[in-house]
Image (cartoon, coloured by chain):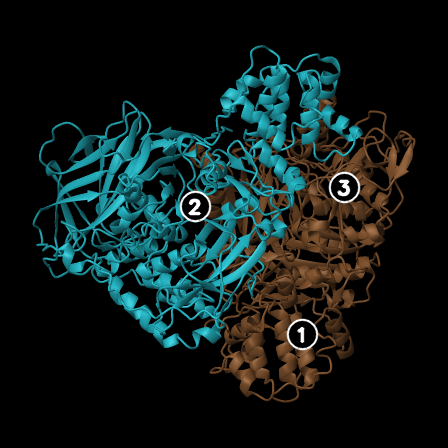
Chain colours: A cyan, B brown
Amino acid sequence: MKNNQFAIRPTDFKDQLTELTEIGFLDKDNESETNPLQLWISFLSKSFLEDKTSSTFEETLKTYMATDDQNLSEYIDSATHVSVVAFYNVALQLLKFNPDVDFSFTDPLAAMEKIQLMVADHNGASFTIDELKSAWYWLLATHNKMGQTYIDSLASKGYFTKFYGQITKPMLFNGKTLPVFNPHKLIREVVYVESPQDSDHDGKRDLLKAEILRPSETENGLKVPVLYTASPYNQGTNDETGEKLTHNVNVPLTHKQPNNLKYSDIEYKNDNQEIPAPRKIDGETKKAEQDFSRESSYTLNDYFLARGFAVVYMAGIGTKDSDGFRTTGDPDETISTVAIIKWLTGQLPAFTNRTDNIKIKAWWSNQKVAMTGRSYLGTLATAAATTGVSGLKTVISEAAISNWYDYYRDGGLVIAPGGFPGEDADVLAEETFSRRLQPGDFHNIKSQWDDQIKAIQAGEDRTTGDYNTFWDARNYHKNFKNIKADVFMVHGLNDWNVKPRNVERLWNGIKHNGVTQKIILHQGQHIYINAFRSIDYNDIINLWLTHELLGIDNQAKEIIPNVIIQDNTKTENWTAYKDWDNAENQQVKYNLSSDKLSTDTVTPSTQSFQDNLDQPTFDNYAKHNDTWEHDLIAADKKLTDNQLIYKTDALSDNLTIDGKVHVQLKVSSSEDIGLLSFQLIDYGEAKRLTVSPTLLSKNSLAETYDWREDDLREFTYAQPTPFKMITKGHINLQNRENNYKVDELKPNVFYNIDVELQPTFYKLLKGHQLGLIVYATDFGMTVRGNQNIKYTVQANDSSLVVPIHKN
Amino acid sequence: MKNNQFAIRPTDFKDQLTELTEIGFLDKDNESETNPLQLWISFLSKSFLEDKTSSTFEETLKTYMATDDQNLSEYIDSATHVSVVAFYNVALQLLKFNPDVDFSFTDPLAAMEKIQLMVADHNGASFTIDELKSAWYWLLATHNKMGQTYIDSLASKGYFTKFYGQITKPMLFNGKTLPVFNPHKLIREVVYVESPQDSDHDGKRDLLKAEILRPSETENGLKVPVLYTASPYNQGTNDETGEKLTHNVNVPLTHKQPNNLKYSDIEYKNDNQEIPAPRKIDGETKKAEQDFSRESSYTLNDYFLARGFAVVYMAGIGTKDSDGFRTTGDPDETISTVAIIKWLTGQLPAFTNRTDNIKIKAWWSNQKVAMTGRSYLGTLATAAATTGVSGLKTVISEAAISNWYDYYRDGGLVIAPGGFPGEDADVLAEETFSRRLQPGDFHNIKSQWDDQIKAIQAGEDRTTGDYNTFWDARNYHKNFKNIKADVFMVHGLNDWNVKPRNVERLWNGIKHNGVTQKIILHQGQHIYINAFRSIDYNDIINLWLTHELLGIDNQAKEIIPNVIIQDNTKTENWTAYKDWDNAENQQVKYNLSSDKLSTDTVTPSTQSFQDNLDQPTFDNYAKHNDTWEHDLIAADKKLTDNQLIYKTDALSDNLTIDGKVHVQLKVSSSEDIGLLSFQLIDYGEAKRLTVSPTLLSKNSLAETYDWREDDLREFTYAQPTPFKMITKGHINLQNRENNYKVDELKPNVFYNIDVELQPTFYKLLKGHQLGLIVYATDFGMTVRGNQNIKYTVQANDSSLVVPIHKN
């Protein structure tokens, strides 16, 4: 195992003592102790929470080895000092490292260096009393083999339950909040926020249900910050009716009528519709009228629920117990998302129920809000940030969409999110329309909902795949300039559901906003990373939110690197960088010839391929997209006529691609239609990481004592593979200029195209080859017309432009 | 979805009223109500736990439809009766069924019949007041779409928290205990049971750590029954050092010296070793000195922790915090397993710690114990039962080994548990030897442990694969006659880890013991089934344990069918049978000829195949056992010379195999060694169930309010496949008589063998073909010598004998 901790806060000795005292490791009985051995025993006795008597404590001491031939009990009886070696031998055992596997008792420090565990300062071979205090402090802040700090592992054993009910403010350690709030005393309540919109056009402002969990200490005056998750899935989904709307993708690509559209022709403009007046308020209360038993929760939020944060969930317009209609990401959805923040910060009213107009304030809120969540949830966090709403201090935007066109479309084509061919904005609207789950409510709005779905279908326009007003309304880039919240981004470099362009545009789109921005890029697909062994994600977010929402000066912004990227060639390797996809990155231009990529001059040549397949092969690939994907990259004989592959020679050095690769082709189609797909490939036998994490142990990560648990996971090596797809891209040959203007395409005439592949950060190892595959139908993402089209590439007028990372 | 509930207890109306009153649905305010509509409203208001005011209750009523055009609020306002249709329309919504998918408001009863939901008696189209009470009672007992009874779903919303701390005995509903005990008040304590053995030969009786969780009500005098799980994995495992011991299986089969062993020559006899005297007791207490924070728990136990049961975990000899050595299933391990039961029933002492000899009794135990757990855990439950220990009322033996020879060996061959080639008794001993995880303890016993591993390796004897004294000591069949506990068995018909013979021997081995025996056979592999949507496993076990451990006369033994088997041809279909693998089952004998199985007379023929493969093919199969398995059954050209396949014609009717298929062959080997493997195959394109369950929703099954959760799972259809393996078997041609006597094998001489394949229950559909594959090396299970051996079958002297199920 290799430990990567980015959230350890440098802390001076005086503050260490203060914190050790506050959490109870130093107390009046041991603070004046001058014998390091005695102090060590005292620390250990406070840590062995299971042992209630001196006999059982003594027995436990015997189960640890202090040196290679003395157990801890024997060592304590015979030693006069606490040797650094003995301390760290025991520390490694406390951290669950294993002498049979991870370290040797003769040299624990060597193992600690290798595992990347922090060793405290010491001047000699033994700790002085002050050095020992400091060493214990840093041990508490160090991750164990199960991906938890030692102090969090003590918390999961009940260390902090003694503070339950005794607390009037959050307790901190090393810049992060501690679980001193009893999660079984959480207050759960429901309110209905009145949002300034009427998305179901019933003449009344939409009421939005919000589910609140807050520490019981708020009843006694504690004001708490809020983690707010807007999750359209949260009140249930319509899997079956959603599935029914899924579109057939085995349809032909059709010719589009050329046009001369300018952006202003299709630009979405706010229609400034009149909205109904607010409800008349008939009274006010501090007491809710509804509660709930089990929210559909996000484990990161669960972690913070014991740490003095309130958590609020909202599913939004068109969901169970709320008004309105689903719109899949339009401005109405942004308004509804922001409404909750406005309520939390006193800018909008909420009611205790849907009929009596009794107002209820978020009187327990400290008016500082962060948004959390992955995928659609992170998308709404991003959307909310683009309004610049006050009170929203930061968004943690994980695997989030920043432009719905980049989710469902690309380059004038319908491009499915990976794994979901035929899904579209209408399907997602239907799936999340949980008002359907309450038949008594749904009965009244059935026909309006059918109309709404039809309107979305008309707007999304699967016929052309063009960018239009519908998509412009769902493009948050336009409002990046309004972002005032600090933005913490997390994205998978192998996320082919929400493709990396979504996060890249956000990353590079707010650099002049004057906000703090952080990004973690991992090697997974569309997953969350808050239960990994090799990176201290929870700690990082704790440090971040303690700063952002509790206003604690913990240097979070300085301590957390701006860019953390997981290495694709090794397990458990995360590196801090200054930037990602920087516009100044050096570029390498590869020329194309025959089947080669090279930086040399090339002689003229053309290569052609067809798109259609015999029907059985087509049917098989349509059913088994994975097989198609494999055969494509392996250049299986079934597909050799359907693709062009260009490869570099074996690389003489490692090569790290950093940013957006461009494919510049001169190309013709035999018809008046055409689509091209591209994959950039790493060719070379190697062990590579799985893109889905491996479950290391189920339920092993407790968010605190007797509370919810998460599964510990990690990216591990899969069986060696001869290749791996790095990134990909697509274009409709009738959208050579942009995604809204349709160009003429004459059969057999050569045109120049420039296609930006999805951004990446990828290390190719020495000896591997970089490859480019040019093909047409992408069985996982494009329409699959199986049409008789032949494409020809004028190789000598084509190139591949690759941005390079130099450190 | 199809609901299968086997644990609904027929209950007369008077008892229904008593129970409805006890749980609070009937009370002084509504018990005299004469208007069914008013009573229905009262029941609903007690069920809508989230709604704290009449306004929110009224709002919730509006979200349900009562008829196809009236919501529940409108219906209540306008109706004069509670129509059966309206009641069940609402009931289906309460049970989370969906009008868009599962039922229609015009005929809910048709859907209920299809889904197999119980409809209460009624004489007219509307319910009388008594009929309504009864209908509500049965609704509470009915499963919802998420695999929980409605009353358990109310429990998960907090319905029973009002009883926390108010309870002096378990509360029952429909014969099953209710979650009226606060799981966050559980008392957790550790004791050290003194077992009458000295398995590490240190001159002292082994102390065994037991972890206890018991309701806090026991402190006030409540005596509770115990669910006891003996789990060697429970204190941690040594995955890395276990892995290191894993044996190379790419080794040749070797000739064995013929012998004339009789059973009495290899029989294990108890050596009646002297054991050290018990410790002198230096005092007694009711208070433990150690606790623990989070046990490694089994979700079935978690379910019962809120329901008035104590749960005890023990890892056993050779595990962390206990004495002794791991033995992998020998009589010493049985003694240690039983020691905990003896402590729980007052027959053995336990101590508060390992040094002070202060005795602590299980003073809170009602002295009735059940054992639970899957795999090794269920194995130890079976082992404990074979001692006839008093106090052990029942064992729930899931996917359990009943003879370790049937786990690691078969027919004179080393046969790996599926998926674990190279694993053996020594590997498992090392993996579970968690004393290694406490270096201070391990340090003192390291060399003795090395000796113990060597002794196991000598005993298991991978060279011959023969049954010997080592295995006889680990064969629980010998002591089946002593079983006095009722036995509840659960096993997967696709479990190739613990193969079905293990459960079949137990099922058929205790029929004359005079105990009650039940069995559930599912279509999964080595899994547990207590979180499936289609079968009420938790309810069944609740009914069972309420009877067995609480002594409640709930007719559990009569209500629960003796045999429940999941259909392999349809999802969510479970059927009650009288017996499984009954010796009286009719048999069909198929003759072999060329490539056919038929009941006709056949003409003489021989067929031959070889065992060796070219090296690349061999290496590929050795690495990818799944590919080998697929190619074998598909008769891929890579393997056509390495197998014989005999198939019936397409079946003219469904055929259900019930029991142990026998392959009777006249066969020769070209060498003086030989092994044969057999697979019985269902040939025919069909959608088949996945053998690993599909996750339907994570954490959606709460064991009760604000407590642990389980993932809801179900066997679903995989993609259609052209074939499926039904069962398999293996034999060493030198073990033609039995597994301990070695026979001569002369090259090219024909011998008769009779091989019993693993027992099964399998329905072949009309039009399919039954196939038998004869081959040698089984890449997933046997040694893989890649030896140049040719086998020849005299087909006309060979046959396949198939037991048939007739209903």
Label 1: how many residues lie within 10 Å, few (<14), some (14-19) or many (20+)? many
Q: Are the residues flagged by discs 2 and 1 from a single subunit?
A: no
Q: Nearer the viewer, residue B376 or A419?
A: A419
In the rendered view, tell whether residue B155 sits above or below residue A27. below
Q: Are the residues flagged by discs 2 and 3 from a single subunit?
A: no
The amino acid type found where label 3 is placed reads Glu
List the residue tagged with mark 2. A527
As drawn, is B110 to the left or to the right of B290?
left
Q: Residue at x 8, y 54 (%)?
A: A746
Furthest-front residue in this view: A283
Q: Can the viewer see residue B393 in this picture? A: no
Dot placed on the residue nearer the N-terminal end, 3 or 1: 1
Q: Can the viewer see residue B470 in this picture? A: yes
Distance between the alpha carbons at the discs numbered 2 and 3: 38 Å
Res. B78 image quadrant: bottom right
Res. A783 image quadrant: bottom left
> Mark on residue B705?
none
Distance between the alpha carbons at the discs numbered 2 and 1: 42 Å
Distance between the alpha carbons at the discs numbered 3 and 1: 39 Å
Front label number (3 vs 1) = 3
Q: Secondary structure at mark 3?
A: strand
- Disc 2 and disc 3 in contact, CB within 8 angstroms: no
As drawn, is A776 to the left or to the right of B88?
left
Which chain does the residue under circle 3 lie in? Answer: B
Q: Nearer the viewer, residue B55 or A785?
A: B55
Across and down, in percent, residue B297 comes to: 67, 46
List the residue tagged with mark 1. B138
The amino acid type found where label 1 is placed reads Trp
Q: Secondary structure at mark 2?
A: loop
The total number of labels drawn is: 3
Q: Secondary structure at mark 1?
A: helix
> Mark on residue B189?
3
